[in-house]
Amino acid sequence: MERTLIKDLKGKIGQQVKIHGWLQILRDQKSMQFLVLRDRTGLVQAALWKKGNPELAEKVSALGTESALTLIGTVVENEVVKLGGIEMQLESLKVEGNAEAPLPFEPFGDTLPDQDYRLDWRYLDLRRERNRLIFEVQTTLEAAMRAYWVQHDFIEMHSPKMMGAPSESGAELFEIKYFERTAYLAQSPQFYKQMAMAAGYENVFEIGPVFRADPSFTSRHMTEFTGVDTEISWIDDHDDVMKFMEKWLAYSYQAVKDKHYQQIKDLLGTELVVPAVPFPRMTMAEAYQILKRLDYKLPPEKKGDLDPGAERALGNYVKEKYGNDFVFVTDWPATVRPFYHMRHEDNPALTKSFDLLGRGLEITTGAQREHRYEVLAAQAIEKGLTLPPIQNYLNYFKYGCPPHGGFGLGLSRLLMIMLDLPNIREAVYLFRGPNRLEP
RNA sequence: GGGGGCGUGGUGUAGUGGUCAAACAUGCGGCCCUGUCAAGGCCGAGACCGCGGGUUCAACUCCCGUCGCUCCCGCCA
């Protein structure tokens, strides 16, 4: 017999069906038993008169909640049943996996175990409907991003995650044993996607793992996360990158809204709004003026940078003033940006760079890159780097590299702000942090 | 790396010097109930209050140390 999904049972009144799922509730009474089975599409009640099948009733009595079951029975209409007005008359049962769940499940959401405990039992916590939804949304989101890139003739890259030499700063790299040498886990595909520019691929993207050996203990950091990266050739300046990015994001939001709007509202309590394009933009100088007006006190040592409180304040300001969850902050001082960000011709103290804040959280850094070998090398030296470790990278720009720029976005951070999740651990399948490598 | 908070049955909490050989909810086990539906009723098992030391006549409760978790800052996506 073929499997029927619970959402399709309404169309099978009077028929015998087979369903698979997890036992959410068992109500074992004197003469009757009621099982509530959950599959990925919903809940249904199955009923059994014990007298009619004592052997089956005994099997049912032995079940623990969250057992994995296959049920066979006849679907009947029954107005009395609060769960959809239908139920299944249980005829046979196959126990695929008996369980005694160490976690309370929905609808006991108000006594949810704490986060760390749920991470230990992640594979059970993920059974909760709202958690499944998060990854359905992620799937739709990534598919939409890819669709947009593909429509615009981007090439998908998969760059190596093991590197022979530390790039950029190097401080946040994980070292790994690589035969007789030391290798490093990639903390960004930055150099490789720029290499694709030198290779003439013009427009590329990559969705892949990124590793950061930062001992950060916050609700928005991970030591391994999924980076969403794009690089675009023949741009005039960083605004071209921003123009691409906002359309690409709005398109992806729209795809999520089309498919999951109601469920996101019902299960997560979040009203998904597709951001209006273009996103508000402000230069760092303008951001500082706004912060001053808002009376936000930025610590003096930040010198041209923002701190998380300032980002939240700007996010709120833009939301109120423009009704947008997103804002580009542009033209960051060279002192707080990496050496490969291009500087403004008329003001070399400022870079042609941007951050994208979503609901006051930094989710993206982007820039036009410096593609002129001599200038790039000079900027590296100015930042205190020595050239030999980055010579391979620098060489990309010796043989005719087009002007280009791009951005890197944290997938889980985007999901976090899109769904208004309180912690990035909710937005990632398996969390990796300084103190967590399991499960 | 710096700072704050927390650590009590399986889970979530209450208790903040003696009345706590620890309470409540939920889960679990048993019994009762011919249709339940966040079922209900009765009974029961389950924590020496993270660990070590100290103060005190007396510590779950105060102090010190330690471990764990968590949040914020730094760093970033």
Image: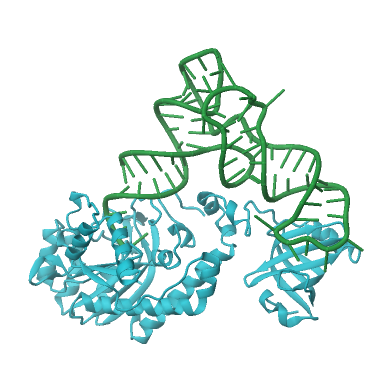
Relative horizontal placement of residue A288, taking residue A75 as reference (left or right): left
Residue under the point 60% across and 58% down: A124
Q: Say which of A338 and B10 sits in front.
A: B10
- Which quarter of the image is occupied by the N terminus of chain A? bottom right
* Residue A402 drawn at (x, y percent): 18, 80
Image chain in cyan: A
Image chain in green: B
| Picture colour scheme | by chain
Residue B46, image quadrant: top right
Q: Residue furthest left?
A: A346
Residue under the point 34% across and 81% down: A155
Q: How many marks?
A: 0
Relative horizontal placement of residue A8, taking residue A113 as reference (left or right): right
Residue under the point 33% across and 67% down: A319
Residue A379, image quadrant: bottom left
Q: Say which of A276 and A361 sits in front.
A: A276
* Residue A205 drawn at (x, y percent): 34, 76
Q: Is residue A217 visible?
A: no
Relative horizontal placement of residue A278, taking residue A267 as reference (left or right): left
**Vertical comparison of B9 with A104: above or below:** above
Residue under the point 36% across and 57% down: A179
Q: Is residue A306 visible?
A: yes
* Residue A196 drawn at (x, y percent): 27, 77
Q: Say which of A256 and A224 sits in front.
A: A256
